[in-house]
Amino acid sequence: MAARSLDQTKFQAEIAGASRRSKQVHSPDKARGILFAGLSMLLAGIIYPGLVSAANLTIKFVDADGKILPKVNVRITHLLTKHFEEEVSDGQGQVVLAGLTDGKYELLVQLKNFFPIKEEIDLAADQVLERVMFNQKFVDKANKEVAQAVEKGEYAKAAETVQRLLKLFPNSAVLHYNMAIAQSGLLNEEKATAEMDTAIRLEPGPKYQDRKKEILRDLFRELGQKALNEHDFQRATSLYQKLTEVDPQNAQAFYGLALALGHQQKYPDALAAVNQAIKLAPSEQQFQKVKEMLETNAKSP
């Protein structure tokens, strides 16, 4: 399959925007925070008497290369009581949050020049976690690796790298498009289609609609030829039919459909398909030869 170029320019802009947003740390007024925390603790004791167990949460922070990250700002908020704790990672990149009430928490992690982490944690006992934080340098490197992998036809490697980026930016239409390219290269029709549909949902308009047609055109052509080679003529028929719908001016699509139908002795439909192929590419002699063969076989008892 011919390598496709990735849509990187807009992605870089999206990343830059995310980076700027990550630097906007909103800190509440100290006195107000103490008052709110004390009130939350009081409410926890009165309204939520069952929340009495305590657990310790230890988190270690490293970058994509495994380097320890000190001075990481950590805020953990109990989703029920709204009581929160704030700490900063030490020289070993570690934060210890002791005596936390059991339950579900929102964890917010921020460090200058790194993308923030926001997730939910269900705490029922002591836990030790490690979290990897990513910066713009990692994103640029990963995006370059994806483009190189696609160019070399290393689609599994490309898909793996894009998946890592999608964990950071799940709502990036560009990344879902790039994943569709990788899945198309892996001949995974279902995943490629799903990724393109996600890109279209995130960024409506003709841009990704047109690119979906391009990806499906190449994918159906590759899969159709593969099915013919494996003598899976029923599947080949389905795939070439899809190709004619995506690209109705593609003579080779109708030619492949004619071959698949002819092998199933569905001669009237096969002849209709090859006639359409000839109409689209009248100078193609092979199409005429196949038509003659189909006409001869259709007349045989």
Image (cartoon, grey):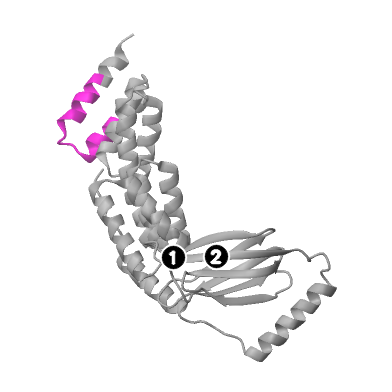
Q: Residues within 10 Å of mark 1 (few under 14, many from 20)?
A: some
Residue at the image position 68 percent from the left and 58 percent from the top: 125
Q: Residue 237, relative to residue 66: is it above or below? A: above
Percent position of residue 71, x then y:
47, 77
Q: Is residue 247 visible?
A: no
Q: Is residue 181 left or right of residue 198?
A: left
Which percent across, then down, holds residue 273?
31, 32
- In this rendered view, identify the residue nearer to me: 189 or 94: 94
Q: What segment carries the magenta color?
A: 274-293
Depicted 35 relative to depicted 261: above or below: below
Q: What residue lies at 48% left-to-right and 60% top-to-bottom?
A: 201
Q: Amino acid at mark 2?
A: Ile
Name the residue beneath numbered marker 2: 59
- Disc 1 to disc 2, how far (Cα)? 10 Å
- From the image, tell me which residue sits under label 1: 62
Amino acid type of disc 1? Val
Residue 245, relative to residue 265: is it above or below? below
Foreground of the two, 73 or 57: 57
Residue 279 is inside the magenta segment: yes
Considering only vertical position in the picture, is 58 above or below 276? below
Q: Position of residue 130 (x, y in %)?
A: 51, 61
Which quarter of the image is occupied by the N terminus? top left
Q: Residue at x 59, y 69 (%)?
A: 96
Q: Is residue 125 left or right of residue 176?
A: right
Q: Secondary structure at mark 2?
A: strand
| SS at badge 1 | strand
Q: Is residue 223 left or right of residue 112?
A: left
**Which mark, residue 252?**
none
